[in-house]
Amino acid sequence: MFALVDCNNFYASCERVFRPDLNGKPIVVLSNNDGCVIARSNEAKILGIPMGAPAFKFKNVFKENKISVFSTNFVLYGDMSKRVMDILASFVTEIEIYSIDEAFMNFNGFKYVDLQEYGEKIKKTVEKSTGIPVSIGFAKTKALSKVANRIAKKFPERTKGVYIIDTEEKRIKALKWLKVEDVWGIGRQNSKRLYNFGIENAMQFTEQSDNWVKKNMSIVGLRLKHELEGKSSLSIEKTKIKKNISLTRTFEKNYTEFEQIKERISTFAVILSEKLRKQNSDCNALFIFLYSNRHRKDLSQYNNSTVVKLPFPTNSSIELSKFAIEGLKQIFKKGFQYKKTGITALDITPENRRQIKLFENSASKHKALMKVIDNINQTTGQQKIKLANQDLKRTWKMKQEKLSPCYTTRLSEIMNVKV
């Protein structure tokens, strides 16, 4: 058996943990630069706030309906996610963290355990320890556990937030209830195609022949069909080294000067290097792009990108910042108003397999230096120690007018309790 544990309205729930006065009230969370809605509480959904709603267009709607608006606080959300996942890992030997708010758990060997009771225990433990409400779905396959989770979340009063698909009758009933566009892995384009063939729910999808599904949806679709039929073909995946790591940001205003963008690229390279060190990896190439403001049709447009092949593998903030700036010099042109830039680490390899070259290598002293910097930043807060070409006053240059405190990761922002 597998279980899919999903945090309910995760971003909104994280905010509510430290603002219990918002329980039962509508909440929306905005994207980078407070652009659009990326998360909604159930109350906000009922009010008709759509996903992706532009914040500036819905400003009056938020005010009229007394909707609490928050900027994305990924530092807080990431830390709360880790706490939830650590608790889940204590209940099983195999867990796959699928996203910031979802995890698959392997329950093979739990034959004589009452899964309903055990699921309720997991749910209660997570909620008591973190304040984050979760829903849990059990089934023979990962795809069916996704279906079971959706039912647990949709009907919390009947399921107590835990639902088990353990009989053929339950499987068939669940698949007939589930719309085809809501099936994990179907996607928007495939669901449109299936509707054109008269396939409207998950059960109708599984009733198609293997050859038809493979022809129209490839081997991936066929694997999904088998999963929904109760034939397990997807196992718990181990944590893998990412093949590439990207960091992109839209500027809070148009930038015209090289030095302005240079500071951003340097900061992105530093954060990228931290991510590499966290998974004990090096990168061997950097992809850098630069876009002008495409929404300003009255301005001249210019977009360009480049790949910088590094002379040696490295995860040093100093070295990656230097190479990233070299790449920016190749694509920057004077006379344009730039709105977005980004950097991607390519050709990622394990740090412990770094091959020493004859003439040029990463500075050996950087490894110890980066370790000290990482420890200090983790203890005192993000980006306390920076390179000289970074902005010393701000970590991110994003519009975040509704940002909540980082209650769990910064000593200066912990809650004050009045007794």
Image (cartoon, rainbow, N blue to C red):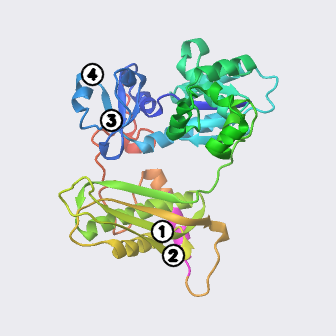
Relative to residue 286, is residue 217 depicted above or below? above
**Is 367 part of what is drawn in magenta?**
yes
Q: Which residue is mark 2?
A: 310
Give SS at disc 2.
Answer: strand
- 78 or 392: which is nearer to us? 78
Q: Type of residue at label 1?
A: Leu
Q: Which residues are magenta?
A: 361-374
Outermost residue to the top: 158
Q: Type of residue at label 4?
A: Asn
336 to the left or right of 120:
left
As measured in the structure, the alpha-carbon distance from the residue carrying label 2 to the one carrying label 3 is 41 Å
Outermost residue to the bottom: 359
Return the disc, 3 or 4, that comes first in the chain's sequence.
Answer: 3
**Residue at 53% across, 35% down:** 191
Q: Which residue is mark 3?
A: 53
Image coords of residue 53 (percent x, y): 32, 35
Q: Which residue is mark 1?
A: 286
Give SS at disc 3.
Answer: loop
As measured in the structure, the alpha-carbon distance from the residue carrying label 1 to the one carrying label 4 is 46 Å
The reply to whether discs 1 and 2 touch (Cβ–Cβ < 8 Å) is yes
262 to the left or right of 157:
left
For label 4, count other residues whose C-alpha is less than 10 Å away and answer few (under 14), some (14-19) or many (20+): few
Residue 410 quadrant: top left
Return the disc, 1 or 2, that comes first in the chain's sequence.
Answer: 1
